[in-house]
Amino acid sequence: MAESNLKENLLIKIVIPKQGKERKILPGGSEPKVFKEVTRTFRQSLSRRIEPINALIKANPNSAVPIRIELVKKATAKSHRPTQLFDPNCPIIAAGSLGELYVKATFKGLKTLNHKILTGHSKKVLKEISSINTIEPVTPTKRLNKIEPQNILKRSPKKRSGFSTKVQLFDYGNSEEQAGVLENFHNTCERIGIEVNQRGYSSKSMVFEAICKTVEDLVNLSKIDEVRNIQSMPIILVNKLKSKSTTTNITNLPIPAIPLNDYPIVAVVDSGIDPQNKYLKPWVIGQYSTVAPEYYNTEHGTNVSSLICFGKYLNPTLKGIEEYNCALFDVQVIPNDDPETGDVEELTEPEFLDTLENALKAHASKIKIWNLSIGTNARCSIDTFSSLAVELDRLQEEYNVIFVISAGNYDENPLLKYPRTGNEVELGRITSPADSSLGVTVGSI
């Protein structure tokens, strides 16, 4: 390689000591600037917002409740976060949507916070006070994401004992304090007759399945201080195409030339591979199934497996598809969801996670690539990662595997335009768990 080309491609610039002139860099940066004038009236208006929060915890001065802080639009950057105003008296415990923070409030902490708001005059504190738009309790309406309780219940999967909802608690950060949060949550749910469990979710996730029998149960659940949000439990779906391609005569499909154990193995987490498919059968190295026979519908899993195994042959007009053969491990977890083909059953998010982890425990030591051509009915948020994606990331780290995840399908007419405008921006988002950080998310047109 020529010397000039070599220099252009160097990733590191070497600076020899004493090559340049030294100059002193003054510490401190620029002085804090307020976002709006902090007047006496503004201080008092914020102070008055603390009064109803104080009323929530006066009955038990040793308890804590979460409160919501809304920042002005100019203060949404993380560098503007009002840590000096709130920490350590009322520490910030979570961030919500853009410009939204959650704070843990105690009786003593609120008293200190109120004093700072009314009398604080340092430049840093003045800037932080000016960044606050409002301070308020976390309301049941907020916990329900401004959705009517009956509408949440309508969208929730039906279980034998009620409707499956998904509940996330606040994490206060302190292990002893969080143990008290969990104890109070469980005791309250037991008292009001709501069954809760953490099946499929890690203990640190603070995510639970709650079975609500009535709208009243859901309303009572939304009044629990420790609850951060409540939603319908997502259902795991296979990403189907509405149109079907015409059958073509494909000949000379490859068969294994060496023992299957010598090929790379892909676990296909799906609806199952048709055991009667003569082309795929030689490539299937094993199976793990949790679907009852009456709910078998292997169409989607067979199609996905065919594309993995015979992509070059099924797409003869596409360039650049190489012929790389691999063995298939059939992980059959998705039951039939098409009433036209037989009995149907829904697979909820925690059921899927629990089943997937059991399969990983048994086979992850030998199989490192796991294909998940599945999705949910929940579009990804622009502010937070979905709990399903977080759990998939945990499993990938814990079992040292890679998940290949579908981005989701938009199959309604008219199709979305590009660039997106108006409500199409929301409609065109990928669906959970495509927001996984460690997985490989694949989309197509």
Image (tube, rainbow, N blue to C red):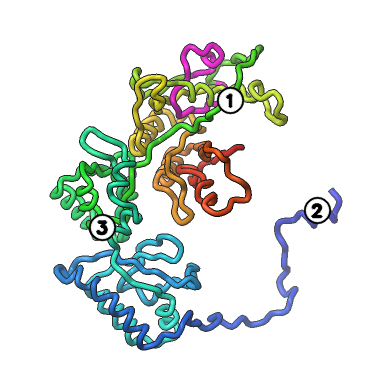
Task: Say few, some or many: other residues with alpha carbon within 10 Å of mark 3 (under 14 / 14 to 19 / 20 or more).
Answer: many
Q: Circle 1 — which element?
A: helix
* Three-letter code for the amino acid on which mark 2 is drawn: Leu
Left or right: 123 as drawn, with respect to 243: left
- Residue range corresponding to the magenta coloring: 262-285
Residue 21, relative to residue 375: is it above or below? below
Q: Circle 3 — which element?
A: loop
Question: Disc 3 and disc 2: Cα gap in Å?
Answer: 59 Å
Left or right: 183 as drawn, with respect to 410: left
Query: Of circles 3 and 2, which is in front?
Result: 3
Question: Dot 2 corresponds to which residue?
Answer: 6
Q: Is residue 432 highlighted in magenta?
A: no
The percent position of residue 308, horizontal first and vertical second, equals 57, 26
Residue sitting at 19 percent across and 45 percent down? 194
The percent position of residue 43, horizontal first and vertical second, equals 35, 83
Furthest-front residue in this view: 414
Q: Nearer the viewer, residue 17 or 170?
A: 170
Q: Is residue 278 highlighted in magenta?
A: yes
Task: Say few, some or many: other residues with alpha carbon within 10 Å of mark 2 (under 14 / 14 to 19 / 20 or more).
Answer: few
Question: Dot 1 corresponds to which residue?
Answer: 307
Question: Disc 1 and disc 3: Cα gap in Å?
Answer: 46 Å
